[in-house]
Amino acid sequence: MELFERARTVRLRCHHDKYLYAEEDESHVSQDRGASSPNARWVVEPVAGSPGVLRLRSRYGRYLSASNEPFLLGSTGRKVLQTLPYRLDSSVEWIPVRDGPHTRLRTRYGNYLRANGGLPPWRNSVTHDVPHRHPGWILWDVEVVQALPPQSESSHPSPAPADPAPHYKPHSRSPSPVPTAALRQPSPQHHRPASPTSYRAQPPPPPPGFIAPPEPGLTRMESTESFSVPLHKVDGRAIHYHIGDDYGDIGEDQEGHSFTFDGTSLEELLERLQEETGLSDVIICSRSPINGKLMPLRLQLPPNNAAMHIVLVHESSKVAKSFP
């Protein structure tokens, strides 16, 4: 689209008013409100011979990549990373699609760049997916930071001279997984391939259609709960929870969360939930199977490590004041 055609460096602002952010570990991608940070700037590289297709390069010289690695087990979203593959393939190629005043970024295989919301681990995460809910989460506003010179707009020159990655010295929160010398290579094709065990050097992506929308029977699970499924049997019980509003209701767009709990008392469970949510004034409730009303849990946990589906409400909420 025309915004990218005239841009050398851009920022991408999502529905949550945060920017696509290249993490300082030079591998992960997230959302951040720091618009002034160079980590929120992406160099636009048109793909030669493919009109309308582009690559986005971070300040570390790595490309925004749609990996084939699931973000969480049991959900359809897949990780978006910074990578520097030995051979630039379709995993680092994006197709801008105009959607009113916004833009959607589509992979070669039909998935869309998605800025997730909700509680951790979804909060501030970025995945690629075929969304069934939250259509606004795949919409991005393109902010041009540096435009191409007028005489160069039609030729799409290589943006390598602008915002060169090797001249940035990252103030990393964690050690860089790739030696700095590797970033000083003149072009990706001269870069030494990463270790076979690293997920940063992605293998060629699967054929079209491999990341397909979930079967009808799974759509409900993906769109409402997005709980992860353990790979093997673990000790403890599964806790699935939502946070209710002032009346104990749960919004349709609210993501559910789960974890495995190995404690034996309500007091331990409350402490664990306070750690998970960061809330200190909550009451653990369950819904009555008879009338669906919320009732506080005050006695003990169900026997035999049975899974629990609970709702947390604030002590000051109206529904909490109605409890006997």
Image: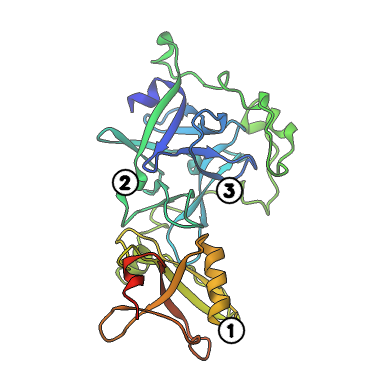
Q: Which element is circle 3 on?
A: loop
Q: Quadrant of the N terminus?
A: top left
Check the image and report above or below for 87 versus 42. below
Task: Indicate which disc, 1 or 2, sits on the residue closer to the N terminus.
Answer: 2
Residue 38 is situated, as x and y percent measured from the top left of the image, at: 56, 29
Frontmost residue, 313 versus 83: 313
Mark 2 neighbour class, 10 Å CA radius: few under 14, some 14 to 19, many 20 or more: some
**Label at residue 202:** 3
In contact (CB < 8 Å): disc 1 and disc 2: no
Q: Which element is circle 1 on?
A: loop
Q: Which element is circle 2 on?
A: helix
Frontmost residue, 211 versus 24: 24
Which residue is disc 2 drawn over?
Answer: 136
Check the image and report above or below for 89 versus 300. above
Residue 120 is situated, as x and y percent measured from the top left of the image, at: 50, 57
In the figure, residue 312 lies in which quadrant? bottom left
Residue 306 is situated, as x and y percent measured from the top left of the image, at: 48, 86
Frontmost residue, 268 versus 72: 268
Which residue is disc 1 drawn over?
Answer: 264
Front of the two marks 2 and 3: 2
Task: Indicate which disc, 2 or 3, sits on the residue closer to the N terminus.
Answer: 2
Q: What amino acid is labelled 3 in the image?
A: Gln
One can see residue 55 in this view: yes
Task: Indicate which disc, 3 or 1, sits on the residue closer to the N terminus.
Answer: 3
